[in-house]
Amino acid sequence: MKEHLNHTMLCDFYQLTMANGYFQSGKKDQICYFDVFFRSVPDGGGFAIAAGLEQVIEYIQDLRFDEKDIAYLRSRNCFSEEFLSYLKGFRFTGDIWAVPEGTPVFPREPILTVRAPAIQAQFVETFLLLTLNHQSLIATKASRIVRAAQGRPISEFGSRRAQGPDAALLGARAAYIGGCAGTACTQADQLYGTPAGGTMAHSWVQMFPDELTAFRTYCKLYPTSATLLVDTYNVLHSGVPNAIKAFKEFGITDCAIRLDSGDLAYLSRKARKMLDEAGLTNCKIVASNALDEYLIRDLLLQGAQLDSFGVGERLITSKSAPVFGGVYKLAAVEDEKGAIIPKIKISENSAKITIPHFKKVYRLYSKEDGKAFADLITLHDETVDETKPLELFDPEATWKRNTFENFTAEALLKPIFQNGKLVYDLPSLEDIRTRCAHQLDLQWEEVKRFENPHNYYVDLSQKLWDLQHALLESQR
């Protein structure tokens, strides 16, 4: 786990004005339930990959205001002294449930739920969203790119295009969760253990009198990890021939060349032929240059002879869909007797109508093939009876219900904090990455399509559906 800053003041100002208002109006201790969920999958995909929980945990554990924070808030002249005094002892004392990192998740379902006194529950909104939104976005994009490569390694090359240092570091972490083999970012390896690697830039080749001298020097220095960049001048007339000469002079067979420009499909085929004819059949060909899942897929369909890819700006910024639309919405409050009172947000846009109450999310797996076929959102005190047939609305025709039998059910939301105490055993990054790969194996190939993926079932239990519609009717 990386050393981290205290991000307590990384919040929207309205969280502080609301907190002061809750304090002044006697609502500071009212228990509230908030859900984090998203409404659509980036790039029109079939699912997203949950990521960022470890940084949420760090934030919650560090949540406190120091004297400089209090002094700044006092200078704004809009907070009561009683409220500022209260903030001096501010800590998170509530409960959090979340989907483990690396889990495929779907629109509308909670991926994290907070139960806490009103000020605490409201205050953590911004940091939870920015962390889960960013890392889930990059992990989701990385998963798409990795799947497009069909088993060929993907290295994350995007630090220089990332939108700030944290975006580079946490983006590399999220990309590793999503399946990337490593990163070009040294500090991400140092802090998180995402394997860092790299060889040379065009400037290395230009620094020497000629290309062959540059290649010879590099091979002499790094005989066990020589990857030569062959497109500084002319790939086929000088780059590949000079790489072959250098490899052979030093007896290097475990090596690679990198293509960073030009017609990658054509050049890779020609380069492969030249390398094989020179006896360098083990020499790998690496490609980079503004790649994404679509370009990689097209290159392979064209017969490109490529063994791995470096992907930068289009991964680290998720350029084609740069926003993960996670939101943080109130779902319920508790009255003075502890009874849960459901809350709903209504909108003329039906997609923005929220699902009320304190909830669970179950993932349903077929006993026949082990594949996930649906998620079911229920009230918190409901359980799924695996011995009885289950009816679910068809997501492609919501007027129709389908019946499922012979399944198992897994509760997705795991306890993370209870009464402000961490109760979750943080997995290693390697374990999270392994979980992600395993969970993807449990999804149907039709759900993993890039275009027009199969609509995965996400349904409400009958009790929850009835409750939601009763609340809607009551607001007419």
Image: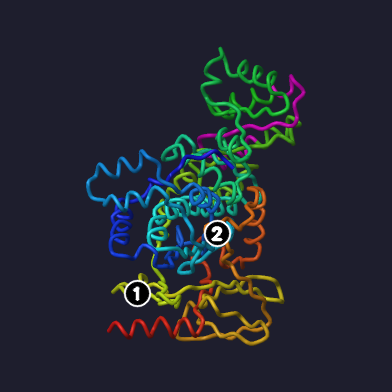
Residue 107: x and y in percent read 47, 67
Task: Write the start and end of the magenta stretch as one range.
Answer: 245-271
Tell me: 62 left or right of 439. left
- The residue that label 2 is drawn on is 417
Tell me where residue 365 appears, x and y as whole percent.
65, 73
* Earlier sequence position, callout 2 versus callout 1: 1
Q: Which colour scheme is used?
A: rainbow
> Looking at this view, is 453 or 124 the one in front?
124
| CA–CA distance in space, label 2 to label 1 | 33 Å
Give SS at disc 1: helix
Q: Quadrant of residue 402?
A: bottom right
Q: In this view, does 461 lie above or below 456?
A: below
**How crowded is the residue under tag 2: few (<14 C-alpha within 10 Å), some, or many (20+)?**
many
Q: Are there few (<14), some (14-19), or many (20+) residues within 10 Å of tag 1?
A: few
- The quadrant in which the N terminus is found is top right
Depth check: give the residue in front, 138 or 361: 361
Viewer-side label of 2, 1:
2
Can I make out residue 294 in this image?
no
Above or below, 254 against 421 in this view is above
Label 2–label 1 contact, CB within 8 A: no
Badge 1 is on which residue? Answer: 350
- Residue lying at the far top in this picture: please name it: 209
User: Could you tell me which residue is drawn at 60 percent across and 18 percent down?
Assistant: 214
Instruction: Indicate whether residue 291 is drawn in magenta.
Output: no
- Disc number for residue 181: none
Disc 2 is placed on an element classified as strand
Q: Name the kind of residue labelled 1 in the image.
A: Ser
Of residues 202 and 107, which is closer to you in this image?
107
**What residue occupies the far left of the structure in this picture?**
77
Please state if 96 lies on the left or on the right of 182 as rendered.
left
Q: Percent position (x, y) of residue 367?
A: 71, 76
Q: Can residue 406 be seen in this view?
A: yes
